[in-house]
Amino acid sequence: MNQNKVIAHKPLLLCSLTLAMALTGCATTSPTPEKTDPWIGWNKGTQSFNDNVDKAILKPVAKGYQWITPTLVNEGVTNFFSNINDIGVTINDLLQFKLKQSGMDARRLLVNSTVGVAGFVDIAKMIDLPKHQEDFGQTLSVWGVPSGSYLVLPLLGPSNPRDAVGIVGDALFNPLTYVSAFGTTAISAAIAGSKAVDVVDRRANLMTTEKIINEGSVNRYEFIKNSYEQNRDFLIHDGNSSQDVDLLDDNSGTNTGNATSSTQNKNSTNKSAPDSNKAKHTLELTAPK
């Protein structure tokens, strides 16, 4: 079954990281011109701050969590928060007019929330309802909002002005936001605790990705920046690069049938990887969104 967008998952893909390593290599030793990275001073300072927080707090806690948590429980926790995320995914599907995908994601949410015991078991994947990744930053892109320059956010990591606004939108789509805001003190504390577990769980799942970055990059800042931008381009264009989309648009008038066939074949190939692979996680080495 062809899908509009499957994560290969919140999230950079391991293949994207490997591609970035191959493409950037030694070329990353050259500094990015300020005209293409106007906030480079802020970005490098914030990345350093995030790395220090990660080294002092998040990584040690994540290692402890990984050590004491059985694999089955760890996967259950990841699935639980992924299921909550599917609420926002479905809403963003609708906002992007992806009606077929929104129906699939709504069914996925329903199945996992019921048969899957509140999402702890990913039953939907077993019945050919794979995980998709849609967020409000991607929705804004579909609406024509430009991304702006690369921006590193404190604690949240790689972003840009459009995706920063998207973080706020996604928070509004998350029911835990309202439960925490309007619930009792005990409920709010429980929600805060669950979010802390989510952060630690995501950080634990990024251990392999971090090793690739540290060992494969000459310039860590450029590597993370390029990988983040490639991943966002991949997600926004449903598995195609922006160059591929432009090429298809240029050829649509003279060879529509071939272009459509090529697009379908490429989407089928790019979106068939299972989301259970830990490469599905995004390149956020500090607290995720």
Image: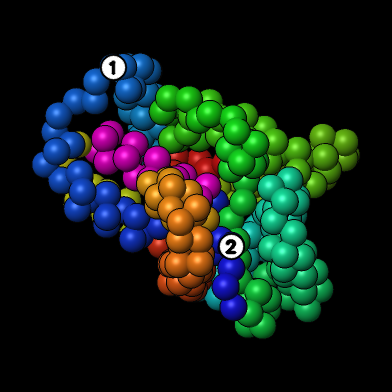
**Taking 23 as reference, is 276 left or right?**
right
> Type of residue at label 2?
Asn
Residue nearest the viewer, comparing 97 with 175: 97
Q: Position of residue 106 (x, y in %)?
A: 77, 64
Disc 1 + disc 2, Cβ < 8 Å: no
Q: Which color scheme does this rendered protein use?
A: rainbow
Q: Position of residue 45 (x, y in %)?
A: 34, 21
User: Is residue 38 depicted above or below 172 in this figure?
Assistant: above
Q: Which residues are magenta?
A: 220-237
Residue depicted at 62% across the width and 46% down the height: 135
Q: What element does badge 2 sit on?
A: loop
> Type of residue at label 1?
Glu
For disc 2, the marked residue is 4
For disc 1, the marked residue is 34
Q: Residues within 10 Å of mark 1 (few under 14, many from 20)?
A: few
Residue nearest the viewer, comparing 51 with 16: 16
**Taking 78 as reference, is 232 left or right?**
left
Q: What element does badge 1 sit on?
A: loop
- Dividing the picture into quadrants, the one containing residue 145 is top right
Q: Is residue 45 visible?
A: no
**Taking 182 as reference, is 220 left or right?**
left
Residue depicted at 59% across the width and 78% down the height: 1
User: Is residue 79 depicted above or below 191 in this figure?
Assistant: below
Q: Is residue 160 visible?
A: yes
What is the quadrant of the C terminus in the image? Answer: top right
**Taking 225 as reference, is 84 left or right?**
right
Residue depicted at 69% across the width and 47% down the height: 96
State yes or no: residue 12 in magenta.
no
The first of marks 1 and 2 along the sequence is 2
Residue pushed farthest left? Answer: 26
Q: Position of residue 76 (x, y in %)?
A: 61, 69
Residue depicted at 18% across the width and 36% down the height: 28
